[in-house]
Image (spheres, helix red, strand yellow):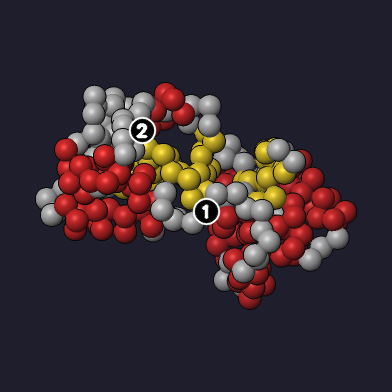
Amino acid sequence: MSMEKFLKAISDKNKLRILNLINYQGQLCVCDLENVLELKQSTLSTHLSKLKQANILVDMKDGKWTYYRINEHLEKSKKIILNEVLNNFLKSETALTDLKKLSSNKNSCIPAKKILVVDYDNSLYSQIIEIELSKKDNITCVSAGIAPAPEVNPLIKKLYPKEYAELRFFTKNISNFKKYYFDLVLILNDFDNIENLNIKFGKIETINLNDIKNLKPKDMRKKLIEKCEVYL
């Protein structure tokens, strides 16, 4: 796709409204776009088709639903332009009104956001994030390690005695999740082989833990979750 055709594809106001909603949510189905944008199904389908042809959107079927998301493999130069355009469009009254309607849509078929938390041994911090984020509405969270420890850190038993007794904590290997798609991957601290994870994801963020390691357990847990909530 040439740059000229790419720019033409995002020059239409309704296409920008579509991209704004999808970029905000991560992925959306046709019915949610229809409800918010109040466009005829035929008109919406035409816009979605053109955005797919421009390689800006990709779709994914889940049962009877088809979900659209921004193509993570979009050329870097085009991705920079798209992000700049959407960031500016987001300041408009139209964009903000659309997002408000999306958030207040009680009949939405938006699926639970799927989150993967990755650290080296999956024994403490990623386990805490998994159980805490799983308590939130519309979120499915799992954790995994690059080289999982044989068992979770003893501090887990102190923080979650009831859940620990119910055998809800066990370490997991990242290789178990390679066939799944995640809306968000949270990497705890940097490690060298992020690009070799082979995980399918919409967004990836790195969380630095250096400032929480010496805190008291409950303070550490609170600060850790605050760091994660920035990206939800």
Type of amino acid under label 2: Ala
Type of amino acid under label 1: Asn
Could you give the CA–CA distance between mark 2 and mark 1, rounded to whole angstroms? 20 Å
Q: Residue at x 66, y 53 (%)?
A: 109
- Rendered view: 67 above or below 118: below
Residue 141 position by quadrant: top left
Q: Position of residue 229 (x, y in %)?
A: 38, 57
Q: Nearer the viewer, residue 130 or 81?
A: 130
Furthest residue in direction bottom, as rendered = 93
Q: Write down the residue under mark 1.
A: 138
Q: Position of residue 223 (x, y in %)?
A: 25, 57
Q: Residue at x 88, y 54 (%)?
A: 42
Q: Position of residue 125 (x, y in %)?
A: 26, 43
Mark toward the start of the polypeptide (2 vs 1): 1
Does residue 39 appear to the left or right of 223 in the view shown? Answer: right
Q: Write down the residue under mark 2.
A: 144
Q: Quadrant of the N terminus?
A: top right
Secondary-structure class at tag 2: strand
Q: Residue at x 23, y 34 (%)?
A: 152
Does residue 82 appear to the left or right of 218 in the view shown? Answer: right
10 Å crowding of disc 2: few (<14), some (14-19), many (20+): many
10 Å crowding of disc 1: few (<14), some (14-19), many (20+): few
Q: Quadrant of the C terminus?
A: bottom left
- Rendered view: 43 above or below 1: below
Secondary-structure class at tag 1: loop
Does residue 104 appear to the left or right of 13 in the view shown? Answer: left
